[in-house]
Amino acid sequence: MSSLLEVQNLVKHFPIAGSRRKVQAINGVSFSIERGETVSLVGESGSGKTTIGRCLLGLIEPTAGGIFFKGQAMGRGVDVRAKALRGRLQMVFQEPAESLNPRMRIGEILGEPLLTLGMSRGDRDRRVAETAALIGLRPALLDVRPADLSAGLQQRVGIGRAIVTRPDLIVLDEPTSALDPTARAEIVDLLKALQADLDTAYLFISHDLSTVRFLSHRVVVLYLGSIAEEGPSDRLFAAPRHPYSAGLLASVMLPHPSLKAERRLTLEGEIPSPIDLPPGCPLATRCPFTESRCRDVSPPPSALGGGHLVHCYNHQKVAALGDVADQLTRFQELASRILA
Ligand SMILES: Nc1ncnc2c1ncn2[C@@H]1O[C@H](COP(=O)(O)OP(=O)(O)OP(=O)(O)O)[C@@H](O)[C@H]1O
């Protein structure tokens, strides 16, 4: 059986007005999502996470490549509101207040996606009530408006509106970043519980690596619109093998006070502009392991077993840096430099 979602060699370049050059936002990204699975996209600002999400939802058209949802080609000319796809693919946004219509009551907001499914009034009301219970919303709150709710409750409604059609996949673009820590923890727990109940797959886009670690089955690490590394979340966080993702993921660990200078990895050089990407590995200008082939030809993925893929000629050098704890310690410095 095919994957729930397959992204094949996705390319998205944005034209620049008055120029022949383009912003090379996504440069040949492939990954898949299985039913009931959470796949996270991580990477610094500008790595292309949101652009991938927007391509999947049909909000922008890919420049090249294929997106297949339940085996059906998406993209050019395919309407996500088409009958077979209606309600199967949903989205939760970063800012709940902005994404909910302030004039509508919560019950209407939750019921709105069901209108396109042609459900009877009675079925819709039942589904809305069930959904309110699933997201932990008291029935009395179905009559209020978004402004009457806290940001955490508003985001519950945002999630409720997404699950009300019982979709196969939800794209969650930074769903917790506008929330305070308590509300954030509650939303993360809610997402986990809903997945257990409904078997919905998530594409989770986030800068919050602790949450990514908690929620994800698999993680895709992006750097300048290309995949650096992907694999099962526990493997990636315990044993990253790409210099970039190792630094990024290690940044969630506590810094080690006894880091010795001779054990430090340093990243020198500029981050290339996405308008002028060099050939080869996008990290080549900054990576301590760069050799001439890195600058010439993008490294093909090396399979490390268990679905762990790394796009680096020198991943053994990363592995050779030591066992996990040791390696994470060393990568603190790398992380702080990459993320500075
Ligand atoms: N409409 C657009 N026109 C031109 N360039 C764009 C457009 N949308 C995104 N980009 C560029 O594409 C690249 C990827 O942007 P994107 O927003 O996907 O990154 P991101 O990883 O989601 O970042 P963030 O974490 O800040 O949301 C960036 O260089 C961005 O400036």
Image: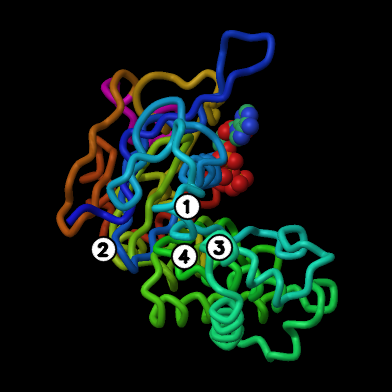
Question: Could you say where residue 160 lies in the image, as x and y percent from the top left?
Answer: 59, 73
Q: Earlier in the sequence, mark 4 or mark 1?
A: 1
Looking at the magenta stretch, what is its main secondary structure? loop
Say if mark 4 contacts mark 1, CB within 8 Å. yes
Question: Could you say where residue 256 lies in the image, as x and y percent from the top left?
Answer: 48, 66
Disc on res. 42:
1
Q: Secondary structure at mark 3?
A: loop
Q: Residue at x 68, y 9 (%)?
A: 18
Q: Earlier in the sequence, mark 2 or mark 1?
A: 1
Q: Residues within 10 Å of mark 3 (few under 14, many from 20)?
A: few
Looking at the picture, which amino acid does disc 3 mark? Asp
For disc 2, the marked residue is 323
Looking at the picture, which amino acid does disc 2 mark? Asp
Please tell me whether residue 64 is drawn above or below residue 204 in the rendered image: above
For the residues labelled 1 and 3, the Cα–Cα distance comes to: 9 Å
Disc on res. 86:
none
For disc 3, the marked residue is 208
The residue segment tinted magenta is 284-294
Say if mark 4 contacts mark 3, CB within 8 Å. yes
Q: Residues within 10 Å of mark 1 (few under 14, many from 20)?
A: many
Q: Is residue 172 magenta?
A: no
Task: Examine the rendering and report whether any part of residue 186 can be seen.
Answer: no
The quadrant of the picture occupied by the N terminus is bottom left
The response on whether ligand 1 sits within 8 Å of label 1 is: no
In this rendering, would 269 be left or right of 150?
A: left
Please tell me whether residue 148 is drawn above or below residue 21 in the rendered image: below
Task: Examine the rendering and report whether any part of residue 108 can be seen.
Answer: yes
Q: Is residue 292 magenta?
A: yes
Say if mark 2 contacts mark 1, CB within 8 Å. no
